[in-house]
Amino acid sequence: MDLLERYRAPVVSALAEVVPSEGPLRTLVGYPLGAVGEDGAPRPGIGGKLLRPSLVCLGCEALGGEVDRALPLAAAVELVHTFSLVHDDIVDGDRLRRGRPTAWAVFGKDQALHAGDALLALAFRVAAEAALPQAVAGLAQATVAMVEGQVRDLEMEGRRVTVGAYLGMVRGKTGALLGCSLELGALAAGRADLAPAHRRVGETLGIAFQVRDDWLGIWGDPAHLGKPVGGDLARGKRSFPVVWGLERDPSLGELLDQGRWEEARDRLAALGAKEATAAEAERLLAEAESGARALPWAAWAQGAFADLCRGLASRVT
């Protein structure tokens, strides 16, 4: 995914500038970003794919804008994303992320909550530096939609829901922030008229990303993911494979309710959920790629986005 490497260095630099240089927040903010270790000492570098800030930069540069104009917004989006991960890990009880102990596992739940709060506040402080009120409003709207999606995700646990309800939930939980990323890129380029179209493409990409993530959560390789698989099944999460499988075989619910995770995974595979989930992710990625082709992007940007979509379809982390 060359697109992610194209912007990595400037995005990492912009994020590093946000980490406090001293005080307790240096470690609490820097650790989940990957900028510092548990002791506050510098780490080799900020981790993660940095997909969302890369999309901000792409959305701007593809329209002829200057990447420097987009960097504050790119950093802000990644800070919001990291805030959500810190709090998600607390809610889900996950102890590993990106091959390292999660923030709450290191600092305790109370301090991890403070870390997430600080990340969110810093995100909007950084976004305000771009002097684009419409962008700050868009980021706030996307953050609310993301949180609402997370609320719906929890409400769905252990319940029978339709694929349509699942996709609606994911549009907020994951799609909102990716949609906002491309939207902010358009705003940074001075093309507010194209912001809604950018947002739609990003939202579709985000839904596809989540569907593929659901696939990895059941059939992925823990060594590649940096965290255990099967946790979603154990928590009763209504991921795409589970929702799809329950629509075809309601008795699958008995295996899940009884904690028979291996049998449930085998049943899902026998029903064809593994192939159906991969196919749905590919369908959504094709839809996102088609939407991007309708945008007045430079040819190199069209190619980079297409390559990104193809990479996401087969990603293993």
Image (spheres, helix red, strand yellow):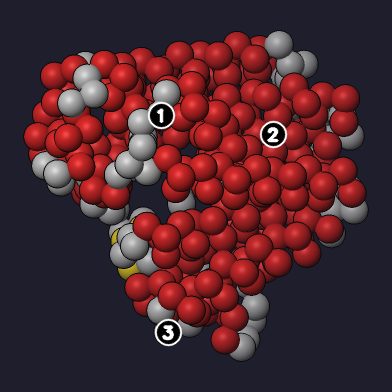
Q: Quadrant of residue 300?
A: top right
| SS state under label 2 | helix
Q: Camera-side residue: 164 or 47?
A: 164
Three-letter code, disc 3: Asp
Task: Classify mark 2: residues with Cα within 10 Å, few (<14), some (14-19) or many (20+).
Answer: many
Q: Residue at coordinates 68% horizontally, 48% vertically from top-left?
A: 144
Q: Are marks 1 and 2 in contact (CB under 8 Å)?
A: no
Task: Classify mark 1: residues with Cα within 10 Å, few (<14), some (14-19) or many (20+).
Answer: some
Left or right of residue 77: residue 8: left
Q: Which numbered dot is residue 39?
A: 3
Rounded to the nearest whole Å, what is the CA distance between mark 3 and mark 2?
35 Å
The residue labelled by disc 2 is 182
Which of the two discs, 3 and 1, labels the residue nearer the N terminus? 3
Left or right of residue 189: residue 178: left
Q: Residue at coordinates 19% horizontally, 17% vertically from top-left?
A: 271
Q: Which numbered dot is residue 161?
A: 1
Rounded to the nearest whole Å, what is the CA distance between mark 1 and mark 2?
30 Å
Q: Camera-side residue: 161 or 25?
A: 161
